[in-house]
Each structure stands twice: as C-alpha cells, then as structure tokens.
Image (spheres, rainbow, N blue to C red):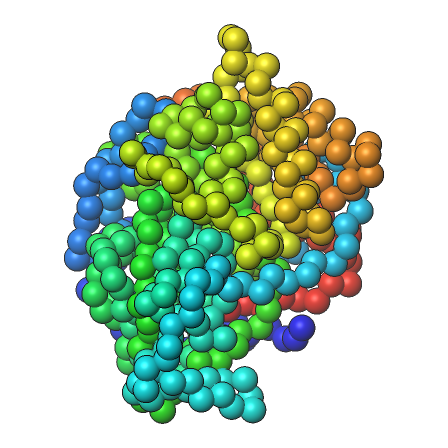
Amino acid sequence: MSTARRPATRRSAGRVGSQSVPVEELGHGPFEKPAPVENMPLAARFSVTTHVEGENGMPERDHKLGGRVAGGIGRRALFKATSITAGGIVLGASNPAFAAGRPSEGALPTATPDMQANYHADDSVSCARGLISTNDKNIKYRGRWEEQTSGSVYGYYESGLEFGFTGTSISVMLEETCRLLHSVDGGEFRRNVGANGTLAIASGLEGGVHSVRIYSEYQQSFPKIKHFQIDRDANTKPLPERPTMEFVGDSISVGYVGAGLVNSLENSFTFRTPELLDLSHNTVAFGGIAVAAGSGGPDATGMVSRYTKLSEYIPGESGVPVWDTSQYVPDYLVINLGTNDPSTGTKAPNFKPAYTTFLENARTYYPDTVIFAMTPFNGAHRNEIFETVSARNSIGDAKVIHIETSGWIDVATETTDGTHPTVAAQDKISHKLAASLQGYFDMRMPSRPVWPAI
C-alpha cells in the first residue's frame, strides 16, 4: 500500500453538482496543519439543491421526519490526536486487511459494445464513449450492494462507492429517484434528495486524475445505478487502498436530528468520524431499531437478526433476502446500539443476551475485524455493554474494545428531544470518537503508514 498522501491543495473543481447555492457556513474551512482533534472544527458548507423533499423514511421511536434541505461536509486531513478520550479496555490487534469492496453477484450481464472494457498496464480501464459499467474493476463498493442481471447495482442501508477517473466530467445514470451524497476530488459532499435519470456530478474539471465518492444520503435511499459516464477517451483509475470502517446503529447513527430539521447521514458521527480519519466507510443503521427482538420500532426484529438481511426495513416487507457477510468485510466495526432497548420493565433483561449474541455473531462473520462497542450517549445499558466486552476479552478476544462515552454530550441541552443529538453535538461526538480511535491506532500501530486522502 502506498504511503504517499495527496497534496493539501485541490484541483479546480469546476462546476460540481446541480444548481447548488450556498446558504450557511459552519466551521472555519480546511486545516493548514494537523491539530488536536477536540479543537478541530468540522467544516460543513451547506448548499441547496433544486429539490427539497418532505416527510419520508422511518425515524427513531415515534418522531416523524420533517422536510430536508441540502448540505455538504468537507473532507478533513488525517490528524494525530493528543490523547485518548474513550475509556474501557484496549487490547491487542493486528494490522488491518483490506476488503475487496465488490457487490454481491447474481448472473453477470453481457457487456454491450459501448461498455466493453479495455484494460491497460497501469490498471486503468477505458470504454467506448466513456460509458463505465458498474462492474468496472476500479470501483470500490463500501457496504451492501447487489448486482442485478441487467448490470445495474442496487444499494442498501447507508452504503457508498468510490473510484478514480480521468477527464473533465462525470455523471451517474440512475434507474429511479433516490437520495445521494457525492463528492469529487475530496471536496465537500453535495446533497441531492431527488436524484433521478442522468445526474451530472461534476463538469469543467481540470484535466488529470480525479476521484469520486457517492453515498446513500439516508436510510431507505435505495440507489439503483445503471452506469457512469465520463469523457470519451477517459479512463477509470484505481484509488489508493484505505482501511474500511462500518458503523452499526439506529437513528442517531443514520443522522436523524429531529422533526422538521435536516435529517441526513452527513450529519451523523458515523459519517463525520471516518471522514476525519480518512477511512473508507459505510453504515448499517435504521431509526428505531433495538438490539433485542421485540423492542424498538417500526422494525421490531432487532439488529441481532436484521444485520444478516440485505436491506433495511420496508413497511409490509416479506421474504427479505439474506445478506452474505463474506461479501464485504470491514477492517473496523463500530457499534452504537442500545438506545431503543428498554432499561426498565419486563423487556430490560433481553438486552444483554441479545448484545452478547450480536458480538459473538460479529466475530464469526469477521474473524480479524477490530470491534468497538460504544456506550449509547444517554448511558443506556452501560454496565451490560462493558460486561459483555469484558467477557469477550476474558476468552481471548482482544480485538473487542469498549468505548465509554460518558460526558461526551449533555443529553439535556445538546439533544433536540432528549434522545437525538443536535448537529453541533454530532460534530462534537465525531471529534471525540475520532480522537479515541486515533489513540488506539497510535498505540497498536505506532509506525503505521499515513493513509492517503481521497
């Protein structure tokens, strides 16, 4: 793996996204040098797209989603934290291995003449007319994607993809309307909640090699990608490999802030934390879900069983396909569950055995993955989580680490409803978690390479 970083300066972005107008500035822009993570502002330049959607999706508990406006979040350079802010047990771990990042495969489509790939010695791939198939070898899929017999790929949960390309423009062709976040050359993420047909992601770029990253913008986004379009005579390029981090959680992890507010993955610590750390990432989260079956809602199956399903909850669902966990193996797994599991009453005892089973299953699925188990921000089930992690450590599983979040935010003043952190609180959580993870990296891999930013 290359140890070189991209320069801090960026290529001219040209026109990126569709008719976006800045409406609000948060933070103070990109950093000129690394800084202690607790002091880092996370710049978020918000922009309005031409479409603003109304109520949709499934928030946590009984709250309803309000309308959404568009936003974006800038990339951050890799930093070195000054201290570890998480408590708990930190034991040994090996260097990470990298996931292949390919979607699950059905019957592979036959390439059309316009999309016939030409492979080159430098690992670039070109196609006639610049039409890029979704099975291009340089596209890295992060999270849950399924290849269709038509050649399209369908995304589930809060998944993403990334690849390099040459030329001056890039578009994505979509089968249906969906909600997307997209970024070119490590720039701010643009939010489009009505993406459909041919979505022009960027044009007017300077010549050379560029990078693009696309994410589902929220739960139930369900992107259906047909192919990509770049310039004639342009190529796709492999991007430097980076470790992968998957987050598992509920509405807090998916970016639900509150009724009538901007609810988006880009608000969440699950998106912002790995951006701070320059890691590839994805999220498996859904509003209202508990760990144990029979709690939470509208999906009352519990993450202990939902995790092995391809898709998040859909009203009236039946026969949800099973997800083959070997299709995507993250280097790091971060769990933030328990908020929707009752702490009192007849269902309270169900949490610990379900959480124990979830950790056992996760270790079976991912033998070498480092697992971080977070205490929920309201302190729910703190003792049970700590005890479950300690039990894993006592049988020799040193790569399960408890992260204590007490004091990270004031639930009384930094949530919108007593449960869901404000955008500013999500930002605060992101920095504290990033500092904790960076401290772990520093202790376990003091001479690790600097992962390149994209």
Residue 377 in picture, x, y percent from top left: 53, 29
Relative horizontal placement of residue 315, taking residue 408 as reference (left or right): left
- Furthest toward the top, the residue is 345
Residue 198 placement, left or right of 165: left
Residue located 21% across and 65% down the image = 197
Where does residue 62 sit, x and y in percent of width and height? 32, 23
* Total residue callouts: 0
Q: Which of 269 and 358 is in front in this view?
A: 358
> Is residue 159 depicted above or below 12 in this figure?
above
Image quarter of residue 389? top right
In depth, the one of 115 and 399 nearer the eye is: 115
Residue at figure coordinates x 24%, y 47% from the top left: 69
Quadrant in which residue 131 is drawn: bottom left
Residue at 33%, 73% (x, y): give it. Answer: 228
Q: Where is residue 147 in the image (x, y as percent from the top left)?
A: 41, 62
Residue at (57, 18) in percent of width and height: 350
The residue closer to the viewer here, 48 or 51, is: 51
The image shows residue 71, relative to residue 172, as above or below, that is: above
Image spot of residue 439 (x, y percent): 70, 48
